[in-house]
Amino acid sequence: MARESDKKPKSDQTTSTGLRQREAASLNDRLNQDIVRQLQKDGRTPFAEIAQNLNVSEGTIRNRVNAMKASGSLRIIAVTDSGASEYRTEAMVGIRIAAGHRPEDVAARLSALEEIVYVVWVSGNYDLLIEIVADDRRTFLSMLSRHIYGQEDIGSAEVMTGLMNFKNQFLLKSNWG
């Protein structure tokens, strides 16, 4: 028999604190913001330690984290610093989609490639903005040649290599809320 904690929360279920599951998963909630800040420092911080830091029960932290994970608003993952890695070539590529093709189809095709680490549909001069990270220049050029240039679904592409990285932050802002 499945334990209550093993069941996937539904949007209308109520947590032990009486909050609806949707509210317990909201990133607009101050306690959830504080929990996320703690996890951003170290995603392996024990719930008991977070609870002590925030003056709430360990069960509250567990319920909130599980609710945010179940809703898709929180994922606890390892993030590498590309500047500290041995990758030698990385660049952003602005892509204009060819007439008669859909950005989401091109995005799906490119997202399947290991060297492409970021794909976003944007407004402005480009339709898609992607980031390519490769071990060396030869691999990078091969990616461009095989998957970007000469593809019928891509009208044009502009490669932009970074000269100096001033900020690379995938964290919530410290003044959030």
Image (spheres, grey):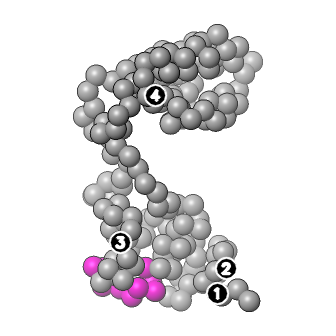
Q: Position of 150 compared to 132: left or right?
A: right
Q: Quadrant of the C terminus?
A: bottom left
Residue at image location 53% in from the left, 32% down from the top: 116
- Please tell me whether mark 4 or mark 3 is closer to you in this view: 4
- Please tell me whether mark 1 or mark 4 is closer to you in this view: 4
Q: Position of 9 compared to 58: left or right?
A: right
Q: Label 2 neighbourhood size at 10 Å, few (<14), some (14-19), many (20+)? A: few
Residue 144 percent coordinates (x, y): 54, 17
Q: Amino acid at mark 4?
A: Ala
- Please tell me whether mark 2 or mark 4 is closer to you in this view: 4
* Secondary structure beneath label 3: loop
Q: Determine the image quadrant of residue 60.
A: bottom left
* Bounds of the magenta segment: 53-61
Q: Nearer the viewer, residue 29 or 101?
A: 101
| Of the image marks 1 and 4, the number of the one nearer the N terminus | 1
The disc at residue 7 is 2
Q: Give the alpha-carbon distance from disc 3 to disc 2, as whole Å.
A: 23 Å
Q: Which residue is mark 3?
A: 45
Q: Which residue is mark 1?
A: 4
Q: Which residue is mark 4?
A: 134
Q: Give the alpha-carbon distance from disc 1 to disc 4, as whole Å.
A: 45 Å
Residue 9 percent coordinates (x, y): 64, 76
Q: Amino acid at mark 1?
A: Glu
Say if 5 sits above or below 172 in the image: below
Q: Amino acid at mark 2?
A: Lys
* Secondary structure beneath label 4: strand
Q: Give the alpha-carbon distance from disc 2 to disc 1, as whole Å.
A: 6 Å
